[in-house]
Amino acid sequence: MTSYLLAIAIQVGILMILTLSLSIQYGMTGLINFGLVAFYALGAYASGLLTVAGWPIAAGIGVAALVGSLASLPLGFIAVRLKAEYLAIVTLGFAELVRLVALNEQWLTRGTTGLGGIPRPFQDQPPIVQAALFLAVVVFLIVVFVLVSRRLTVSPYGRILASIRDNEAAVNAIGKNPSRFKIQIFAIGSAAGAVAGALQAHYIGYVSPDQFVAHVTFMAWMAMILGGTGRVSGALIGAFVIMLFFEGSRFLRDVMPWISEVEMASVRLAAVGLLLILATLYRPQGIVGDYSSR
Amino acid sequence: MSSGQWIANQVLNGLVEGLVVALVALAITLVYAIARFSNAATGDYLTFGAYVTKGAATWTGSLAAGFVAGMVATALLSVFFYGWVFRRLLQRSHVIALVASIGVAFFIRHTMTLFTGHEPFVFDVPIVRAWNINGLLLQPTDVAVAVAGVASLGLVFALLHFTALGRHMRAVADNVDLARSSGIDTDRVMIALWLLIGAIAAIAGTLVGLKSVIHPEMGWDLLLPGFAAAILGGFASPIGAVVGGLVIGLTHELAAPFVGYSYKLAVSFLIILAFLLWRPGGLFGRVEEVR
């Protein structure tokens, strides 16, 4: 039971980092990233490939963050010239592109077979301790990204970000360059997404293209919207509630054994859609959303 | 086969594929012009239409009957989601509507797979040899798909330009307040719009199904080319969407042998990027007319 709880806590933690990534990008500057899974995939492959080649895991995760933010730069430069909706479509396309590369560039990614044998940290420990230590690493990284977000929100820098989101023309008028801020924020958020991917790779020890489909992105979107956009606590609570809901749905099969595992997967994904609809209709500000503004 | 014949064949395939993309782009563009958001559920309306057509065609034994059933069912589905979701988001930010449309897309697709499973289906059409016209290989199904595609595009444009309803739709697209104050019933226009979107999506879905197979991801896979075509066409211009669709289809087929068939989709992405940077207004768009 303890190991099961630890496993779930790790998944919750990884989703929290993904949601924080969106929350940094969308919540703070209104950049719409529908290609979050691309950065998640880049992080997973970067760290996976390097550690398989013998690099230490910590270095792998560090490089993953770097790869994530570097990959976001061209998109960031494009993003600042585009309307929010166009960026949404461009990032959606970027995610497809990354998935196609992962599928087809066999020499690098081993295609559909996937990349196995990715080292898991603390392997000399007994399983429970190993999981607990892994969870500690996840929590530590969540704290890092929460601190980064906090720092970004309450600093003078953060006030510029909030004003970019609320009124970009005004920011321009006082002589600040919103583009630079947006590109930086996009890079920071993407680094978080890549770190989440790297953690996932080291947790299950295996990456393959079918882990990186669009619903990863929209799970995080749902968590962010449910929790409340633009709030760090919202991202954390949203991710927790979503994971609770999805893990809970596994127990549904004990009550309704006639539903097959494949059908259950459909039900879960349909629920992602339904919750997204309901959240936008009835709780646009989320559970702990910013009710004072807008 | 000479290279001239090869090019002619690729162009032909590209045009047929382009017609399907044009239908998707038209559905995206009409919603963007009139309801003012990017509808990411368009692809899954298409998938739904293909499945209903297949189901009804198998049940009645007639493809035509299935086609009609698919169009009616998808039109109703589309109006249902308008009434339930998009109508309430009209006054809100178009980003919210876009996120909601993703929700609609997931909801439709996975509710469907709950009943249909993930195995692909095919239409029971007789397999016939391609006609060989001086080395130009012509698939009879492709000809049928092309004729149906052109006919439906023609009907949509006739509706938009020669009927009172079409005039009202274009008026709402231009200026919703002005349209309302000139006595146009905007609610009626919206319902007609969504019925039309559903029908177009079902046609596109059936045509894709006839050309290849019906599977749960078929619509989602067409969403990116559809968006690319819509952006190419200026995002608010129906005729631009059709031209954009044909361009995307042609580039896919002509580029595929060079970039590899698996990277066909990536070509759409690169076209989107290039166009957004070079001409944010698209081929037919007025610059910065986008709200």
Image (spheres, coloured by chain):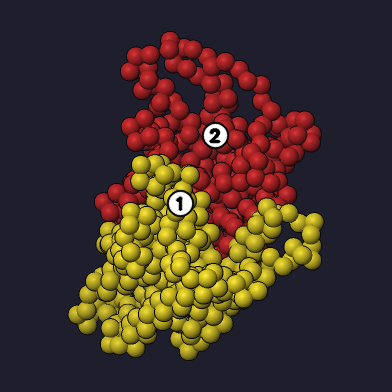
Chain colours: A yellow, B red
Give above or below for B185 relative to B203: below
Q: B68 left or right of A92?
A: right
**To which chain does the residue with label 1 belong?**
A
Determine which quarter of the picture holds residue A194: bottom left
Residue furthest top as drawn: B134
Task: Find residue B104 and report its horizontal and vertical position in percent.
Answer: 60, 60
Q: B219 left or right of A142?
A: right
* Residues at marks 1 and 2 touching, judged by CB atoms closer than 8 Å: no
Residue drawn at the location 41% of the way across and 79% of the way down: A140
Tell me the SS state at disc 1: loop
Q: Which of the two marks, 1 or 2, is nearer to us in this view?
A: 1
Give above or below for A26 relative to B170: below
Task: Find residue B162 and report its horizontal and vertical position in percent.
Answer: 54, 43
Tell me the SS state at disc 2: helix
Q: Amino acid at mark 1?
A: Gly
Mark 2 lies on residue = B149
Task: Find residue A145 and report its horizontal and vertical position in percent.
Answer: 38, 78
**To which chain does the residue with label 2 belong?**
B
Give above or below for B51 relative to B185: above
Mark 1 lies on residue = A116
